[in-house]
């Protein structure tokens, strides 16, 4: 039982005490986050039937190179819409709580998210398995493509070779960045605790990481208000919203704010 005065003694969710103890005892924590950790920041998840981005579009229809080649303007517009939405969002207490944990013990934070909210909450060395929404690259560029050669448009294209600018995210059917994937797998294999927050556990190879951690001896804690495909790998499943739950799992510094 925690004696931290900042943490209430009651346990609003079954498993909270056990999760607290596992985190307190952990020497090295591997964290995997998904779209759910940003839900309380107002960023739609992919599977929320009410507001989910995928509710409007078939994911294979938009988040793939094939879709981009077929409908560049539509896909580019979808990413511009998401960029504006994320830019207006702010990190929530779950993002700040993870940044606070990293100040208390070794944490490797691996995210499937492309919204950059972990970094805005102060987390460093975030491993972005699926890239970043605010990065751009080129679709089969000439090697000299850059902002200086870009002809403005939706999407911009290279004045030298005509290549289309594209979002710097990992699309379905594309391999994950090798270094990011290697670092994430190494962290999963060497941690003694795996904390999974806000993911349906349906998108691979990211969804395989908690199982890899478990196979190497880690205990697993899942935080998700809904059942997920990763529950069967968990020692503890907390049926909770991340923003409400994470600040109760370990001591917080109480200074969590984003500069205006
Ligand atoms: C690849 C960037 C091969 C783009 C994204 C097995 C092995 C390997 C691959 C596959 C495989 N099986 C199938 C595949 C193919 C595919 C795949 O996994 N498909 C799925 C749909 C079945 N995988 C791939 O294509 C990957 N590439 O394997 O390449 C290869 C190998 C070598 C060489 C060439 C190729 C690439 C996958 C990356 C795709 N890109 N994002 C963009 O964002 O536009 S994935 C995208 O969707 C997100 O990044 C995220 O990762 C994913 C959605 O998952 P979640 O984050 O979990 O979000 P979701 O909405 O599903 O769930 C939210 C959860 O939050 C819910 O459970 C909800 O209950 C919970 N929640 C809600 N509110 C809260 C909350 N939790 C806590 N608190 C709250 N308040």
Image (cartoon, rainbow, N blue to C red):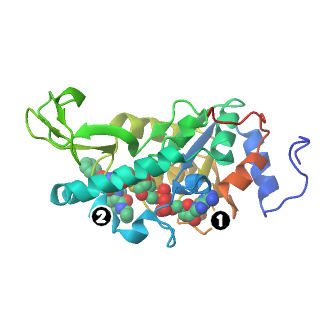
Q: Residue furthest left?
A: 161
Ligand 1 quadrant assignment: bottom left
Whether residue 254 is visible: yes
Q: Does the beta carbon at disc 1 come under 8 Å from ligand 1?
A: yes
Instruction: Using the image as rendered, state which of residue 239 and residue 122 is in the foreground.
Output: 122
For residue 154, the mark is none
- Image quadrant where residue 6 sits: top right
Q: Position of residue 98 (x, y in %)?
A: 65, 40
From mark 1 to mark 2, how far is it between C-alphas? 26 Å
Q: Is residue 163 left or right of residue 48?
A: left
Q: Is residue 145 left or right of residue 112?
A: left
Q: Where 195 falls versus 58 (above or below)? A: above
Q: Which element is circle 1 on?
A: loop
Instruction: Using the image as rendered, state which of residue 182 and residue 113 is in the foreground.
Output: 113
How crowded pointer 2 is (Cα within 10 Å; few <14, some 14-19, many 20+) is rated as some
Q: Is residue 240 left or right of residue 153?
A: right
Q: Where 176 falls versus 66 (above or below)? A: above
Q: Where 175 falls versus 203 (above or below)? A: above
Q: Please name the residue that numbered disc 1 is placed on.
A: 225
Q: Please name the residue that numbered disc 2 is placed on.
A: 60
Q: Which element is circle 2 on?
A: helix
How crowded pointer 1 is (Cα within 10 Å; few <14, some 14-19, many 20+) is rated as some
Q: Where 116 falls versus 222 (above or below)? A: above
Q: Position of residue 53 (x, y in %)?
A: 43, 63
**Residue located at (92% from left, 42% from top):** 3
Q: Does the beta carbon at disc 2 come under 8 Å from ligand 1?
A: yes
Q: Earlier in the sequence, mark 1 or mark 2?
A: 2
Q: Is residue 155 left or right of residue 20?
A: left
Instruction: Using the image as rendered, state which of residue 85 and residue 177 is in the foreground.
Output: 85
């Amino acid at each position: 039982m925690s004696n931290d005065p900042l943490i209430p003694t009651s346990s609003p969710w079954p498993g909270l005490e056990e999760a607290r103890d596992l985190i307190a005892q952990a020497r090295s924590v591997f964290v995997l986050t998904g779209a759910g950790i940003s839900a309380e920041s107002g960023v739609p998840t992919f599977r929320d039937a009410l507001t989910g981005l995928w509710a409007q579009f078939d994911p294979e229809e938009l988040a793939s190179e094939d879709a981009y080649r077929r409908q560049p303007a539509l896909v580019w517009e979808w990413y511009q819409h998401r960029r504006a939405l994320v830019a207006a969002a702010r990190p929530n207490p779950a993002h700040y709580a993870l940044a606070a944990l990293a100040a208390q013990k070794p944490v490797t934070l691996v995210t499937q998210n492309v919204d950059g909210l972990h970094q805005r909450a102060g987390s460093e060395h975030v491993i972005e398995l699926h890239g970043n929404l605010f990065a751009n690259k080129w679709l089969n560029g000439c090697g000299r493509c850059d902002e200086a050669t870009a002809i403005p448009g939706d999407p911009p294209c290279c004045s030298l070779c005509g290549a289309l600018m594209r979002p710097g995210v990992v699309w379905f059917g594309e391999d994950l960045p090798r270094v990011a994937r290697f670092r994430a797998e190494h962290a999963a294999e060497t941690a003694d605790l795996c904390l999974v927050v806000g993911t349906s556990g349906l998108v691979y190879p990211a969804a395989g990481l908690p199982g890899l951690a478990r196979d190497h001896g880690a205990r697993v804690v899942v935080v998700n208000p809904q059942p997920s495909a990763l529950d069967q790998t968990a020692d503890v499943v907390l049926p909770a919203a991340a923003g409400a739950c994470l600040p109760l799992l370990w001591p917080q510094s109480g200074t969590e704010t984003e500069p205006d």
